[in-house]
């Protein structure tokens, strides 16, 4: 299920999903007892999955081991893990072959010279957050543990393609693309090896050359620019995708791109030169029965609902979502905001500013770009969410921003702030993104109007006038099925619907506001004892409940988003 299409035709890839042996290790004794060589006992579970949806394991945070036996014809192997939550140590026949930190980023491990035959793969998974974890322990979602997305085994032969980023610029008329490819090649043999390497975008071959690499050498090549004329653009109504095929004599990598141009400034957001209003929702990729091991079938259902409401955008709060999901957004023309899980409220200044934590955040950005670079639907990179206005955040944001600007392609860069009129890092943002909960945690509905006045004044004072503003979070909790005779009763569906209606109407008519992401698409599981008043142990601000049943707000949003879309079309 990795993607919605096959990434390889030539390369031999086997699925390592399915049955794995599983053993929880609450006392952390597995290292000493040699579990890395194979588990002495355990039950069979299905991978991908998380353990916190199983009876007896619902609230278990700690260490657990997974084991799988597989057959290979040997050679150089690449083990690809789409998501292990949160820390993985991987062993092949008892030998430690790699580790990875970060629940939502894909990673792979290459092992050379593996003998033909049966082998044992063991993964030690640690789900407990610690002092330097991203996110921190205090977070408003449930930190599941497990191997939550797919695992696959790739046989690399000869010159192999590890990644292929298609970089392009467009002419002013958006009809001609100047295209090149950044290819990461690897020689999987223990001897010099050469191969013809080609890259095609749609029908156009943009690169073809002989490349020679030393034994096990990795090399990144930036291919020369090539012009592609009369291109079709990727847009919301016409999401045209081009296939991208990179091949060598022994390997291939297939992907897709779309040509489009996003820009912000002069109080506008323009996609392909046309002004757009962002009408979105925040989406966690989570479900009570599956946790973060979210099935593709349900991704489609989420998207059907989101499209039915008339959304043109989704914020992937608060972490990179499955690539299959982002593929679907590419296919449907939905604009996506992708971010890493720095959920600021959980961080003290000391921890946030710890060099290891800053580097870990940077690494998460690197991994996000590595795997998600080609997706045309990603129009926004989010640097972090709701970090308190600590003095250190200026330098950290500067660092992340510089990295994303240099390497992130044509995307808007931003962060979501919870301190709209105290913020110190707007200078790094292309769009100003505000999370506020007036009418729910504080103030009444009218305090939204005051916020807009204060925000405009603050933007003037800090030299930010002209940057489009987006409300990246706002909303209210509602218990599905709870109604009263008075609409204003907190937790009722009507209260939530009214608040969202008020906000959407207000933002829509405010000339410096160019978009909104409702918090949030669906209810999500959180923690017992959360200091945030999480009734039923859920964040209940979904406009659909956790099983995707619509609340009253769903219909309010649908009515308004469709009305706004019509207005936009008739302009
Ligand atoms: C914040 C945060 C969200 C969620 C929300 C809420 O804005 O970014 O993850 O916790 O508040 O529901 O309070």
Image: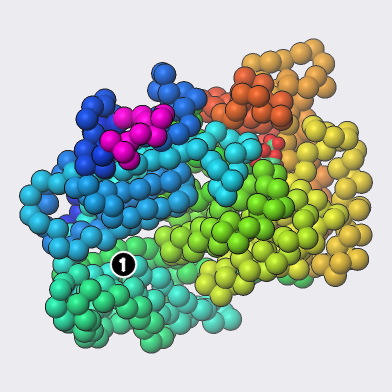
Res 553 quadrant in image? top right
Q: Can residue 68 be seen in this view?
A: no
Query: Is residue 230 toward the left or the right of residue 446 in the image?
Result: left
**Residue placed at 56% from the left, 59% from the top?**
356
Please check the rendered image and state whether residue 28 is part of the magenta-colored stretch, yes or no.
yes
Please name whichever residue, 431 or 44, is drawn nearer the observer in this view of the structure. 44
Instruction: Pinpoint residue 146: horizontal percent, then vertical percent.
Output: 39, 37
Instruction: Pinpoint residue 505: horizontal percent, then vertical percent.
Output: 79, 42
- 469 over 56 or under it: above or below: below
Q: Can residue 372 be seen in this view?
A: yes
Quarter of the picture for ligand 1? top right
Please name whichever residue, 204 or 167, is drawn nearer the observer in this view of the structure. 167
To which residue does mark 1 refer? 162
Tell me the quarter of the image containing the C terminus: bottom right
Q: Classify mark 1: helix, strand or loop.
A: strand
Image: magenta residue range? 23-33
Q: Which residue in the rendered view is the most extreme toward the top? A: 485
- 420 over 206 or under it: above or below: above
Instruction: Pinpoint residue 374: horizontal percent, then vertical percent.
Output: 43, 65
Query: Is residue 538 toward the left or the right of residue 485 in the image?
Result: left
Please check the rendered image and state whether residue 279 is part of the magenta-colored stretch, yes or no.
no
């Amino acid at each position: 299920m990795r993607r919605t299409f096959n990434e390889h035709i030539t390369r031999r890839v086997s699925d390592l999903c399915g049955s794995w042996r599983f053993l929880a290790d609450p006392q952390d004794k597995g290292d000493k007892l040699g579990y890395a060589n194979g588990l002495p006992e355990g039950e069979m579970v299905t991978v991908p999955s998380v353990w916190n949806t199983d009876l007896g394991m619902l609230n278990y945070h700690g260490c657990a081991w997974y084991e799988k036996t597989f057959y290979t014809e040997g050679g150089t192997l690449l083990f690809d893990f789409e998501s292990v939550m949160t820390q993985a140590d991987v062993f092949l026949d008892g030998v430690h072959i790699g580790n990875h930190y970060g629940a939502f980023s894909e990673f792979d491990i290459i092992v050379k010279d593996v003998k033909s035959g049966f082998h044992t793969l063991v993964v030690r998974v640690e789900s407990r957050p610690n002092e330097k974890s991203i996110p921190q322990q205090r977070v408003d979602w449930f930190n599941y543990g497990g191997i939550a997305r797919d695992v696959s085994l790739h046989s690399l032969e000869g010159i192999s393609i590890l990644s292929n980023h298609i970089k392009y610029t467009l002419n002013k008329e958006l009809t001609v693309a100047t295209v090149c490819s950044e290819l990461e090649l690897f020689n999987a043999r223990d001897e010099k090896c050469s191969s013809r390497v080609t890259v095609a975008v749609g029908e156009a071959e943009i690169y073809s050359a002989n490349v020679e690499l030393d034994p096990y050498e990795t090399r990144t090549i930036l291919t020369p620019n090539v012009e592609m004329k009369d291109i079709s653009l990727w847009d919301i109504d016409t999401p045209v995708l081009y296939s991208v095929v990179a091949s060598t004599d022994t390997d291939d990598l297939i992907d897709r791109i779309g040509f489009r141009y996003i820009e912000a400034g002069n109080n506008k957001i323009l996609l392909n030169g046309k002004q757009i209003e962002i009408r979105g929702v925040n989406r966690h990729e989570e479900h009570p029965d599956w946790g973060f091991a979210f099935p593709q079938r349900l991704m489609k259902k989420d998207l059907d609902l989101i499209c039915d409401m008339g959304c043109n955008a989704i914020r992937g709060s608060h972490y990179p979502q499955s690539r299959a999901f982002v593929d679907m957004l590419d296919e449907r023309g939905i604009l996506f905001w992708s971010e890493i899980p720095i959920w600021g409220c959980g961080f003290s200044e000391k921890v946030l500013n710890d060099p290891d934590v800053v580097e870990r955040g940077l690494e998460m950005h690197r991994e996000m770009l590595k795997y998600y670079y080609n997706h045309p639907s990603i129009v926004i990179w989010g640097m972090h969410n709701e970090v308190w206005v600590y003095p250190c955040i200026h330098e950290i944001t500067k660092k992340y921003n510089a990295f994303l600007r240099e390497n992130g392609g044509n995307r808007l860069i931003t962060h979501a702030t919870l301190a709209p009129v105290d913020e110190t890092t707007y200078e790094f943002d292309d769009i100003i993104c505000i999370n506020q909960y007036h009418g729910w945690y504080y103030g009444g509905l009218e305090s939204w109007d005051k916020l807009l006045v204060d925000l405009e004044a603050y933007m003037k004072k800090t030299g930010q006038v002209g940057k489009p503003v987006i409300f990246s979070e706002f909303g209210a909790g509602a218990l599905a099925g709870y109604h009263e005779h008075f609409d204003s009763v907190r937790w009722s569906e009507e209260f939530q619907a009214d608040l969202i209606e008020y906000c959407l109407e207000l933002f829509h008519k405010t000339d410096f506001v160019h978009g909104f992401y409702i918090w949030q698409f669906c209810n999500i599981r959180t923690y017992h004892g959360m200091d945030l008043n999480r009734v039923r142990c859920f964040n209940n601000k979904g406009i659909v409940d956790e099983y995707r049943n619509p609340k009253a707000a769903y219909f309010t949003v649908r009515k308004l988003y469709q009305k706004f879309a019509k207005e936009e079309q008739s302009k």
